[in-house]
Amino acid sequence: MNISWDAAKYTHDFSFVHQYGAALLDLIDGEGLSVLDLGCGNGALTAELAARGHDAEGMDASGDLLQTARANHPELRFRQGDAADFQAEPPYDAVFSNAVFHWIDREKQPGMIACVYNALKPGGQFVFEFGGYGNNARIHAALGREFEKRGLAYRMPFYFPAIGEYAALLERGGFQVRLALLLDRPTKLKGEDGLYDWIRMFVKTPFQGIEPDLGEEIMRSAAKELEGALRHGGDWYADYVRLRCKAVKPRESTCFAKI
Ligand code: BEZ
């Protein structure tokens, strides 16, 4: 995960990230569980986990987001850590994550899944959602066209896997996959420049090494090109597709070999 966050802007303008995450919490079975919120961001969903009676702890790689999380929720525990390289002692009853794993390169996913597996008790639940196959396809296609028109190559900066690919990774990591869904979730963006602002906030790496004025022109042109497809009744909508999963660490690891 390689991005520095403007924590205040993220919390104010992109609050849908945690608002939508609330439905995902319903997939955690049981009460009073120890739960790690992996990639907790500003801590909004860590607080929601705690409000539901869980012993919740948040972990994030970003010091800025953790500062916001600690300021907003001083009663909760937060720690800094890399989702693809962490350890937990004692292990948790559940690991929860919302809108994080698409930031982690494909090659690092098996390592991240192994960390989660090791961080869970036998029978522990792994409940998460992130961008799935086709997520923001129109946005990235439009950016790709704008790059190409200018003789530049656009490299997709996110990992948006299909159900089959991700379920296989989980099973190879020793998990039993109990639920996997791919859901369209058009997401309303704030403001007149909603899509342009979204691109500026989240799509950083393809613009590295490009003159700021040219980058600005590309973002504006892509947003303009998408008015017909992603602007309805004056409001902008990002074409989100969610991969929502629940997997369980088996209680008995001796009967079934890892796939
Ligand atoms: C997402 O939540 O799907 C997402 C957010 C920002 C950038 C890329 C994907």
Image (cartoon, grey):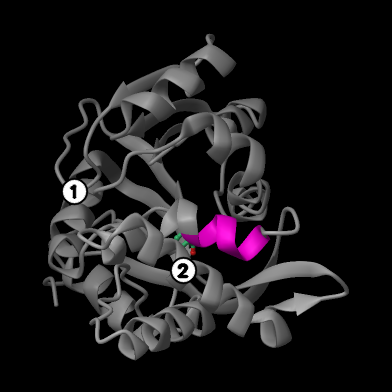
User: Which picture quadrant has residue 216?
Assistant: bottom left
From the top left corner, tell me how far across and down residue 151 is, in percent. Answer: 25, 87
Residue marked by disc 2: 217
Left or right: 235 in relation to 133: right
Query: Which of these two is toward me, 44 or 124?
Result: 44
Determine if the magenta segment contains residue 145.
no
Query: Which of these two is toward me, 59 or 52?
Result: 59
From the top left corner, tell me how far across and down residue 112 is, in percent. Answer: 20, 53
Circle 2 SS class: helix
Q: Quadrant of the C terminus?
A: bottom left
Residue marked by disc 1: 84
Q: Is residue 31 visible?
A: no
Q: Which residues are magenta?
A: 194-199
In terms of sequence position, does the residue under pointer 1 or pointer 2 come before the other? 1
Is most of the magenta stretch helix, strand or loop?
helix
Is 185 drawn above or below residue 34 in the view shown? below
Query: What kind of residue is marked 2?
Result: Glu
Left or right: 196 in relation to 97: right
For this orientation, the residue located farthest to the right is 233
